[in-house]
Image: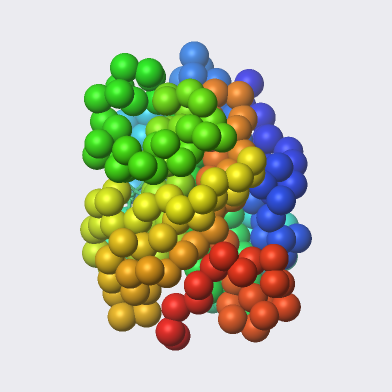
Amino acid sequence: MTAWILGLADLLELSPDIRLSGLALPTSRTSMDVLVHAPTSWLGQSMVTGMSHKRRTEFLAGRLCAFHSLSEMGVDAEFPLPVQDRLPIWPPGILGSISHCASVAVAMAAPATRFHAVGIDVEMLIDAEIAQDIRHSVGRDRELECLERNIPCRARSLTLLFSAKEALYKALYPFSRQYKDFHAAEIVSCQANALVLRLTEDWCGSWRGGACVEVRYAWMDREVLTAVCIPRVSSIHSRITLAAITQPEV
Ligand SMILES: CC(C)(COP(=O)(O)OP(=O)(O)OC[C@H]1O[C@@H](n2cnc3c(N)ncnc32)[C@H](O)[C@@H]1OP(=O)(O)O)[C@@H](O)C(=O)NCCC(=O)NCCS
């Protein structure tokens, strides 16, 4: 059965201002399983009817999570959220991010008064052989060595690095509006539930090379979940524990 996953925000130790919803998607079932959770008005949308089964399942699951997170903040929104440049446009005053893989969909929503940027990613554990093949595209040897001091399994460390960089990319894309490959940021430290990525080049006027961003992470069953939640400057000053984060010039 498709089922809500409870406690994800606590798992990542996110601020209580952030709403994070997740759906477990049984991979052996068809998209009908997700459709029963979706309001009937969603299903006639041309955007949805033109999709393949897999895409429709993941898209609807992501949107269900988004609507769940928004309703927990007391915000109503119309399906399917307008999209520009593949980016969902969130209701005024809300920042959000969606991610889905074959087994899990997640969506995070946060108040724009408290947060500057958010990005979320969920990734299924990459197969060990594939991890070996793609490792040079995802990071430098020293990055994997840094991760493997905490996570002594190449497949897991590479999946985490991949996911963390995608979460960062999603958080900063609304500012940079340009593609950045996986060498545009590098890991500088890793702890049990968080790591820090540093931009290796300028991403845009407000996000320069050298800026550091914390990425929180947690392992689920076969997936890793990563989240970037960058507080606004005033919030940073009141949270000295986030000293690793370099706020851009905005
Ligand atoms: C955009 C990208 C990050 C999406 O990741 P993905 O693993 O393919 O897909 P996910 O399920 O995690 O996320 C997809 C959702 O993210 C959102 N999204 C799409 N493009 C986005 C973007 N440029 N920025 C932020 N969010 C985006 C959408 O909501 C999308 O879901 P939807 O189409 O159902 O609405 C990925 O396709 C990509 O281009 N990665 C390469 C760039 C990168 O990560 N560089 C690393 C720099 S260090």
Q: Quadrant of the N terminus?
A: top right
Point 36% across, 62% down: residue: 199
Point 37% across, 79% down: residue: 206
Q: Is residue 188 visible?
A: yes
Q: Is 58 above or below relative to 239?
A: above
Residue 147 picture location, percent across and down: 48, 38
Residue 71 picture location, percent across and down: 68, 58
Q: How many marks?
A: 0
Point 38% across, 19% down: residue: 127
Residue 238 picture location, percent across and down: 72, 78
Quadrant housing residue 11: top right
Residue farthest top in this picture = 28
Residue 151 picture location, percent across and down: 54, 31
Q: Quadrant of the C terminus?
A: bottom left
Q: Is residue 41 visible?
A: no
Point 68% across, 35% down: residue: 5
Quadrant housing residue 145: top left
Q: Is residue 140 left or right of residue 110?
A: left
Q: Is 11 above or below relative to 153?
A: below
Q: Is 55 above or below relative to 168?
A: above
- How is the rendered protein coloured? rainbow
Q: Nearer the viewer, residue 94 or 208?
A: 208
Q: Nearer the viewer, residue 49 or 132?
A: 132
Q: Is residue 156 left or right of residue 235?
A: left
Q: Nearer the viewer, residue 173 or 38?
A: 173
